[in-house]
């Protein structure tokens, strides 16, 4: 295994084709006879929230010096890495739309074990784009409140997803016969933040930072492909006032969870908390926008169940995401939220998603997004960040 290199998976194309066929079948099963269509996963939206992202004029030399002192990266490797590329190239302030959602494939109470996602759409990002982009001037970064994913291969993804489509006891049986995946799933869903505005989020999958001059996208998934650098993203909650200290994790109380569950209805804790928190005139919430460099081959790019240990590769802050007071409980804004389309493949070429499951997401996200918009009869408009709904 080589540093900064993604590898093809055994029978990758076979499981690509099977997963696409199953995804199309599932969307038809869910929505063919319905008036509209929603997502197939992360279906329960809590809210869409306006934000801003400031990219800092961070000290690249200082970051490299720290990496040389704390990791096994050689001076030659570090000299060939350029951190200030694409979105990170220059200090700038960007408007942002955030979508908060649960991870499951159906709407359930927020007391149910699950991941919580924050999809970040950064607006006004210019540069050479990925050919799969569905927008022209945005960069999407999709993050969850889990450091890694629970399915390690495309084959495993197809296997588990097939049982989810079947429903009933089949997903449970699959997990019983895949105890390692079951353990990972229990770990990543066993987190109940009090607020999504003070939660930490990770990309869990990796992205390139730059492309080599001879890069050929047709080779990905066929032969090993090396990049100048590979990173993961994180958004770490910090206090809005200097020195912007990290905010510790705060969980919903067991009493709160039990009360919500005992009512026998699907609670909407996270949407209600977002509405109430952001309605306060002085509301302000911040996250440090951070990158983590792959520093040794054992930090797998393709197996996203492998945790990139922060002791072996620290996160470095390169910007700050800020959310302030706003009203979000508006019907037109809810419609806007449902219609928004996110994909890790919507953005700049230098931030190309890498790894086997990211290659799968390229085709699945496109299929689901186009299906939703066609079913809704939607003439999709790229967001500008200046939308108003009152």
Image (cartoon, rainbow, N blue to C red):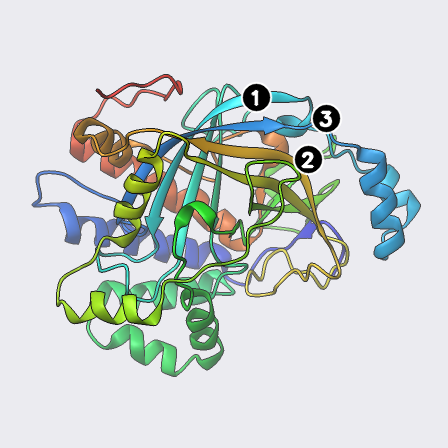
- Which secondary structure, mark 1? strand
For mark 1, what is the residue? 93
Q: Number of marks in the image?
A: 3
Closest to the camera, between mark 3 and mark 2, is 3
For the N terminus, the quadrant is: bottom right
Task: Please state the horizontal and vertical placement of residue 210, each as a whole percent of the image.
Answer: 69, 34
Task: Please state the horizontal and vertical placement of residue 229, each as a whole percent of the image.
Answer: 73, 43
**What is the C-alpha distance between the residues marked 3 and 1?**
11 Å
Q: Nearer the viewer, residue 206 or 162?
A: 206
Q: Please tell me whether residue 225 is drawn above or below residue 261 in the rendered image.
A: above
Q: Is residue 213 left or right of residue 184?
A: right
The residue lying at 74 percent from left, 59 percent from top is 297
Q: Is residue 292 left or right of residue 288?
A: right
For mark 2, what is the residue? 215
- Label pair 3/1, CB-CB below 8 angstroms: no
Task: Please state the horizontal and vertical placement of residue 227, each as a whole percent of the image.
Answer: 71, 42
For mark 3, what is the residue? 57
For the C terminus, the quadrant is: top left
- Which secondary structure, mark 2? loop
Q: Is residue 258 left or right of residue 348?
A: left
The residue lying at 43 percent from left, 70 percent from top is 185
First of labels 2, 1 by sequence position: 1
């Amino acid at each position: 295994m080589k540093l900064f290199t993604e590898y093809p998976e055994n029978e990758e194309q076979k499981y690509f084709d099977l997963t696409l066929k199953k995804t199309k079948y599932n969307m038809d099963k869910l929505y063919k006879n319905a008036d509209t269509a929603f997502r197939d996963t992360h279906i329960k939206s809590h809210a869409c929230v306006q934000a801003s992202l400031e990219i800092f004029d961070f000290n690249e030399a200082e970051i490299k010096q720290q990496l040389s002192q704390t990791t096994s990266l050689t001076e030659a490797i570090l000299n060939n890495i350029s951190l200030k590329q694409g979105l990170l190239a220059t200090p700038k302030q960007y408007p942002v739309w955030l979508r908060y959602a649960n991870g499951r494939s159906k709407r359930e109470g927020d007391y149910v074990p699950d991941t919580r996602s924050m999809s970040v759409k950064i607006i006004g990002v210019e540069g050479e784009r990925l050919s799969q982009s569905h927008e022209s001037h945005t960069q999407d970064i999709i993050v969850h409140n889990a450091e890694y994913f629970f399915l390690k291969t495309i084959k495993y993804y197809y296997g588990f997803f097939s049982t989810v489509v079947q429903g009933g006891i089949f997903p449970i049986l699959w997990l019983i016969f895949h105890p390692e995946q079951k353990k990972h799933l229990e770990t990543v869903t066993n987190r109940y933040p009090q607020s999504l505005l003070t939660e930490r989020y990770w990309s869990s999958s990796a992205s390139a930072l730059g492309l080599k001059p001879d890069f050929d996208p047709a080779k990905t998934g066929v032969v090993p492909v090396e990049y100048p650098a590979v990173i993961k993203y994180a958004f770490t909650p910090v206090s809005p006032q200097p020195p912007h200290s990290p905010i510790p994790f705060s969980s919903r109380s067991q009493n709160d969870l039990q009360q919500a569950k005992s009512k026998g209805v699907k609670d909407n804790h996270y949407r209600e908390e977002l509405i109430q928190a952001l309605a306060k005139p002085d509301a302000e919430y911040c996250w440090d926008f951070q990158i983590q460099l792959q520093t040794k081959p054992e930090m797998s790019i393709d197996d996203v169940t492998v945790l990139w240990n922060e002791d072996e590769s620290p996160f470095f802050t390169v910007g700050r995401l800020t959310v302030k007071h706003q009203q979000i409980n508006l019907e037109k804004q809810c419609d806007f939220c449902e219609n928004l389309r996110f994909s890790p493949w919507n953005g700049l070429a230098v931030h190309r998603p890498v790894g086997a499951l990211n290659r799968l997401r390229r085709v699945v996200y496109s299929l689901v997004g186009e299906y939703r918009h066609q079913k809704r009869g939607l003439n999709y408009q790229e967001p500008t960040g200046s939308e108003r709904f009152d």
